[in-house]
């Protein structure tokens, strides 16, 4: 009898955790509904938010977010600084309000790059400056290598570009596994992440303080939906092998590449990634920000804008669409 009671309590506890995870995700979705447009691409839809200046646009800037994030992070901090540009901020496949498209296979940065370009070829046929943060560095460099005619320049913000020692946080492995993943996500990873979200957000800014209201303005709680949380771990788990194979090609980059990073970034090594790709790229430049962690676009948005301005030049003449 005691064993049955204990088993019943365990089942109830697990059911409660499962339901709590679903409720956390539903609450996040209700708090941050999609406010942009959708583009149909093979496999589903991609969500994006576009902003245009009042008059003629100096040029077009495309913003691509990193892991554990969505379009709102880069847009919230860089949008006001880029008010003379046409801005397109995309949700990567499986993040924000974009569909995962090809399921687990979409963890491959090359597939994400192709999906984003399928969308951008329709809404932004003009050359643009591509700005990518953190994990998005892997797919942004793939776009730069495969579609160089589309880019005026590439700005990497603490971008992941090269293989690194030490692997990834342990929980990304079980979260991304095909069968165990959905269960582990709902019963372990997501409940823990909901508690650790605020401290985790602060850690990416360290040693500087976090931008006030970052979790709210960046809509970071959208990560706390089971499918999105799993997609995030799948992306992280797939990136090391991808950049290991791709890194040897960076000498082929044909456009200006500016790698901006903090000297205190404890998440993506400035030396392994940003400094190295700046040396490999024929038109590479390395910008190291003192006392800055993994969020250089929050710490020094004016440096990011300066890099974009230099790539576009003083007389782009591109009209707002």
Image (tube, rainbow, N blue to C red):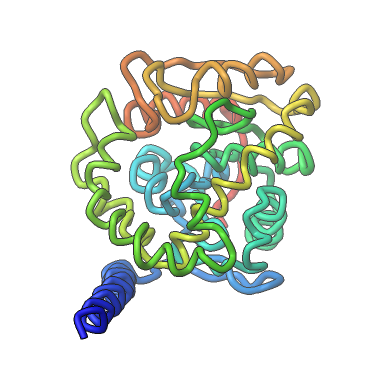
Q: Residue at x 28, y 27 (%)?
A: 206
Most extreme residue toward the front, as rendered? 1
Q: Nearer the viewer, residue 60 or 160?
A: 160
Question: Which residue is depicted at the point 52% across and 50% down?
Answer: 173
Q: In which quarter of the view is residue 145 placed?
A: top right
Q: Is residue 203 left or right of residue 144?
A: left
The percent position of residue 108, horizontal first and vertical second, equals: 67, 51
Image position of 140 with respect to 3: above or below: above
Residue at position x 40%, y 16% in the image: 263
Q: Position of residue 77 (x, y in %)?
A: 34, 41
Residue 225's place in the image compared with 66, above or below, is below
How many marks the image carries: the answer is 0
Residue 80 position in % (x across, y down): 34, 43
Rendered residue at 63%/37% (across/down): 240
Above or below residue 121? Residue 110 is: above
Q: Position of residue 46 (x, y in %)?
A: 57, 66
Which image quarter holds the C terminus?
bottom right
176 or 48: which is nearer to us?
176
Q: Quadrant of residue 12?
A: bottom left
Up-down: is 37 above or below 313? below
Can the viewer see residue 266?
A: yes
């Amino acid at each position: 009898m005691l064993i049955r009671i204990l088993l019943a309590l365990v089942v109830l506890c697990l059911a409660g955790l499962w339901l709590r995870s679903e409720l956390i995700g539903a609450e996040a979705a209700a708090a941050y509904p999609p406010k942009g447009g959708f583009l149909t691409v093979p496999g589903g839809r991609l969500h994006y938010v576009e902003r245009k200046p009042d008059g003629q646009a100096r040029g077009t800037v495309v913003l691509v977010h990193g892991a554990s994030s969505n379009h709102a992070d880069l847009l919230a901090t860089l949008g006001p600084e880029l008010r003379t540009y046409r801005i397109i901020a995309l949700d990567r496949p499986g993040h924000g309000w974009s569909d995962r498209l090809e399921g687990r296979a979409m963890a491959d940065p090359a597939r994400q790059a192709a999906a984003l370009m399928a969308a951008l070829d329709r809404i932004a046929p003009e050359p643009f400056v591509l700005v990518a943060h953190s994990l998005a560095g892997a797919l942004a460099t793939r776009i730069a290598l495969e579609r160089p005619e589309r880019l005026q320049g590439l700005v990497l913000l603490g971008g992941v570009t090269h293989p690194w020692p030490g692997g990834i946080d342990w929980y990304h492995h079980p979260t991304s596994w095909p069968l165990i993943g959905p269960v582990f996500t709902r019963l372990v990873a997501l409940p823990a992440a909901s508690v650790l979200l605020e401290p985790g957000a602060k850690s990416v800014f360290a040693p500087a303080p976090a931008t006030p209201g970052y979790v709210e303005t960046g809509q970071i709680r959208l990560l706390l939906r089971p499918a999105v949380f799993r997609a995030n771990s799948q992306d992280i788990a797939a990136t090391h092998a991808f950049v290991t194979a791709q890194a040897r090609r960076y000498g082929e980059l044909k456009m200006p590449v500016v790698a901006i990073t903090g000297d205190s970034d404890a998440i993506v090594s400035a030396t392994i990634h940003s400094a190295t790709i700046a040396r490999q790229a024929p038109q590479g430049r390395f910008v190291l920000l003192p006392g800055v962690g993994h969020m250089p676009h929050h710490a020094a948005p004016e440096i990011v804008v300066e890099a974009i301005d230099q790539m576009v030049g003083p007389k782009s003449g591109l009209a707002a669409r």
